[in-house]
Image: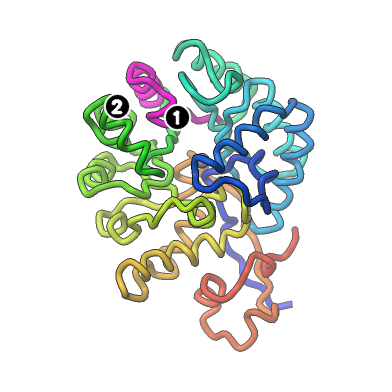
């Protein structure tokens, strides 16, 4: 069999439990969908997390992902269950333990930033790779962001945070702080080369300049952002500034890294009316190396694609054929 070896894809942003919402269509907008998501999140036990996540992680492996950044906000016992599920499935996990100061469900929240950091240390002490994940400027007050920003920089740990996914979040941040979300993250010391902003869909030019100056990355999750009606990420503006982009399956409504990469370039083409905004090699780098760097992972397994797959028949440039004309079923099961 003719095959092509590639670095395994890296899924820099996942909420595995949201896979349960696949195919469910209720919720008129993001905020309506969020109600359904909170219903699912509220009912999960550690046993259910463990058994459910094994299935989701197997689906990721079959699609060619070899590393997952699990952005976890269901509680500490459930964090350990997620790590066990990753080990059982055989995927490398970086547990992005979420800090949640206000809003959401009670199970998401810690009493203080110090409580959160002691939870993080507990998970880290078991030898698991961890990162800090202030959920959003919505869920974390300013003093939490300052404390977490300091800690991540001092410990050289990844810091991931949702920002600018929805206009309402920006309006609320402006009303509370007089700053847009990424401006607040910059002021509170949360940006830096170890930081990744998830979405940045509605980031303005000044916010993107701040990311570029700090050397931070953006994690774009195109299939989820389309599913939730978030908008079009300013992909070409991000690239023009030299900001690294990685990808995430986020809500896991779809698990296919090639589709995420195709959509990434598709968004850029629709916005600019041009082709080739991101080169094929850049896109493949977004799907693997950039995600690994965002998670602080230096080595991870390769994958093999089946060059005799029907979707690649007659294709001369197989790398471009993979990104623009194939789905994850070209990945050979390992
Ligand atoms: Zn997310």
The residue depicted at 72 percent of the width and 29 percent of the height is: 44
The residue depicted at 44 percent of the width and 33 percent of the height is: 158
Scheme of colours in the image: rainbow
Q: Nearer the viewer, residue 159 or 8?
A: 159
Q: Position of residue 148 (x, y in %)?
A: 40, 21
Left or right of 204 on screen, residue 29: right
Q: Which residue is mark 2?
A: 189
Q: How far apart are labels 1 and 2 at the CA level?
A: 14 Å
Under circle 2, the secondary element is: loop
User: Is residue 145 found inside the magenta-colored segment of the image?
Assistant: yes
Left or right of 162 on screen, residue 19: right
Q: Position of residue 241 (x, y in %)?
A: 25, 54
Tell which residue pokes out farthest to the bottom in this image: 314
Under circle 1, the secondary element is: loop
The mark found on residue 157 in the picture is: 1
Left or right of 193 on screen, residue 63: right
Task: Look at the image and give the residue range highlighted in magenta.
Answer: 130-153
User: Is residue 95 found inside the magenta-colored segment of the image?
Assistant: no
| Above or below, 40 relative to 68 | above
């Amino acid at each position: 069999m003719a095959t092509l070896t590639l670095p395994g894809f890296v899924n820099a942003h996942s909420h595995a439990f949201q896979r349960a919402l696949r195919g469910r269509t209720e919720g008129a907008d993001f905020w309506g969908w969020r109600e359904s998501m909170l219903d699912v999140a509220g009912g999960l036990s550690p046993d259910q997390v463990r058994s459910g996540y094994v299935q989701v992680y197997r689906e990721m492996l079959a699609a060619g992902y070899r590393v997952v950044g699990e952005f976890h906000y269901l509680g500490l016992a459930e964090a350990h269950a997620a790590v066990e599920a990753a080990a059982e499935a055989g995927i490398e996990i970086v547990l992005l333990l979420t800090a949640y100061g206000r809003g959401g469900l009670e199970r998401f929240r810690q009493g203080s930033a110090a409580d959160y950091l002691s939870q993080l240390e507990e998970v880290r002490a078991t030898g698991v790779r961890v990162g800090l994940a202030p959920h959003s400027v919505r869920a974390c007050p300013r003093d939490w962001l300052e404390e977490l920003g300091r800690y991540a920089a001092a410990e050289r740990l990844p810091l991931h945070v949702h920002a600018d996914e929805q206009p309402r979040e920006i309006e609320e941040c402006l009303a509370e702080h007089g700053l847009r979300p990424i401006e607040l993250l910059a002021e509170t010391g949360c940006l830096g080369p170890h930081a990744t902003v998830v979405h940045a869909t509605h980031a303005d030019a000044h916010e993107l300049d701040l990311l570029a100056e700090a050397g931070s990355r953006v994690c774009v999750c195109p299939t989820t952002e389309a599913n939730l009606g978030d908008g079009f990420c300013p992909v070409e503006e991000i690239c023009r500034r030299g900001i690294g982009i990685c990808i995430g399956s986020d809500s896991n409504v779809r698990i296919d890294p090639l589709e995420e990469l195709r959509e990434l370039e598709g968004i850029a083409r629709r916005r600019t009316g041009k082709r080739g905004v991101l080169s094929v090699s850049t896109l493949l780098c977004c799907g693997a190396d950039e995600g690994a760097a965002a998670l602080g992972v230096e080595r991870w397994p390769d994958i093999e694609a089946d060059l005799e797959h029907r979707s690649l028949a007659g294709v001369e440039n197989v790398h471009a054929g993979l990104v623009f004309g194939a789905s994850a079923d070209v990945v050979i099961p390992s």
